[in-house]
Image (cartoon, grey):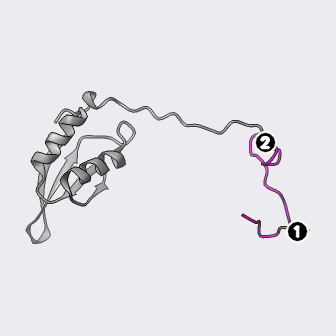
Amino acid sequence: MTRLFAGTQFDIPPSCDRCDQLIDDCKCPPESIPIERQSPSSQTAKVRLDKRKHQRLITVVSGLSEPATDLADLLSQLKSACGAGGTIRDDDLEIQGDHLDRVKTTMTKLGYCV
């Protein structure tokens, strides 16, 4: 990607924040943030049905926290197992429709306590 002022008097090449060298010459290792995940067997999930407007049902999985669980990956697995859409809202996984049994069996296969 070219810089906005490349080749002009305002051209300032980007430098590393840690060593103040040019980005091309920087030898700093990339920053990595360790993410501690808990095993599924140590987490208890609560699965329930909710009614939304116009009598629509959704299956809600709650009791799991974001740092301990990869909620996006778990939601993707549950959506493909149920063949339905879903979303993450306030650390709760919401699957469209009445899929209580499928969600419970899928989460049990993945190792979660339901």
In the picture, the quarter occupied by the C terminus is top left
Q: Amino acid at mark 1?
A: Gly
Q: Residue 7 lies in magenta, yes or no?
A: yes
Question: Could you say which disc has been placed on residue 26 in the image?
Answer: 2
Residue at image point 73% right, 37% down: 28
73 vs 10, left or right, is: left
Instruction: Point out the tag, 2 or 1, that comes first from the N-terminus.
Output: 1
Proximity of marks 2 and 1: CB atoms separated by less than 8 Å: no
Residue 52 at x, y percent in the picture: 14, 65
Q: Is the residue marked by circle 1 packed among few (<14), some (14-19), or many (20+) residues within 10 Å? A: few
Residue at image point 27% right, 27% down: 42
Q: Which residue is mark 1?
A: 7
User: How many marks can you see?
Assistant: 2
9 vs 17, left or right, is: right
In the picture, the quarter occupied by the N terminus is bottom right
Describe the element under mark 2 as helix, strand or loop: loop
Spatial CA distance of label 2 from label 1 is 22 Å
Residue at image point 39% right, 33% down: 37
In this rendering, is residue 86 above or below 8?
Answer: above
